[in-house]
Amino acid sequence: MTAKTILAVLNDPDTAAGVIETAIMFCNQSGGHLIGLFAEAPEQVFIYAPMEVPSASAIAAMQEAAQERADKIEEIFRARLEREGISFEWRKFLTAGGFSSSGVIDSARSADLVICGQIDDDTPSAQRSDIELLIFECGRPVMMVPYILKTPKPIERAVIAWNGSREAARAAFDALPLLTGAKEIEILSVDARNNPSQSADLAGSELASTLARHGVKVNVNNIVSGGTPVGAVIENRVSDIGADLLVMGAYTHSRLRERLFGGATSTLLNSMTTLTLMSR
């Protein structure tokens, strides 16, 4: 199955161009339809006023700022897509619910692929929480585009981060339409352990056999971290082989645990260097 409906989440004018270009690349490959979507993700602002009621002017100013951001991004989106000749549409959700509004979730759950810009420690907390919520709840593969990627490249080398989990399996097979054109795929396990999901000695081998039947070259690589955080090990390997795509399950642990204690998902959301497809 190819991605015939692609949803590009565009909530930041500074990162919109990279997300749009990536979405265009995949649409050109699949002949797909592109939906550009803006959703308000307001920061919590404490406004001191009599009876703790925000003034009408303060509320109007926040609404106006959100509208200006939406208009700017829509202008960028339409100008680029009209030049490209791709089937597209624009959606805007200016609600206090942000990404958690039903319209955004419905749009994401009805798409083959969702594409977002990278989030890191500098991302406003409400916006970060909304994108994390989207990854966690939408039930669709979410492609994150790093800040540094201005012009996307065809996917020739890919790394699949593999730990035998349900989330990792979901990500690997969600990514299959993107992997079949790759020249080389590496299935990477870090500190593989014997557990009900896998044998440490055979970690990734069954998945490699399945992917190989699709006619792609597959390598299996099991790495011992030596105490280095798993997310950093994955990052280093992606950089070492010049991978164009990283595929991984998202939030194998709960989001709360990742926030409190760290985890591969949080690490890679902060410092990704290549296209990263996450599934939950």
Image: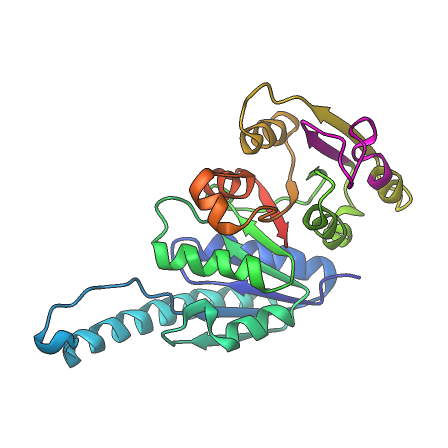
Residue 198 lies in what quarter of the image? top right
Q: Is residue 117 visible?
A: yes
Q: Which residue shows up at 76% across the image and 61% down it?
A: 2
Asked if residue 125 is among those painted magenta in the image, a careful observer would answer no
Q: Quadrant of the N terminus?
A: bottom right
Of residue 31 and residue 256, the one placed in the foreground of this image is: 256
Q: Residue furthest left?
A: 50
Q: Is 101 displayed left or right of 176 in the figure? A: left
Q: Is 27 displayed left or right of 105 in the figure? A: right
Q: Residue 123 at x, y = what percent? A: 37, 50
In this view, 41 is above or below 214: below
Q: Which residue shows up at 56% across the image and 57% down it?
A: 135
Q: Quadrant of the C terminus?
A: bottom right
Q: Which residues are magenta?
A: 185-207
Q: Residue furthest bottom?
A: 56
Task: State the scheme by which the image is colored.
Answer: rainbow
Q: Residue 231 at x, y = what percent? A: 55, 34
Q: Which residue shows up at 63% across the image and 70% down it?
A: 109
Q: Residue 274 at x, y = what percent? A: 57, 40
Q: Is residue 118 visible?
A: no
Residue 88 lies in what quarter of the image? bottom right
Q: Is 213 displayed left or right of 250 in the figure? A: right
In this view, 88 is above or below 177: below
In this view, 264 is above or below 83: above
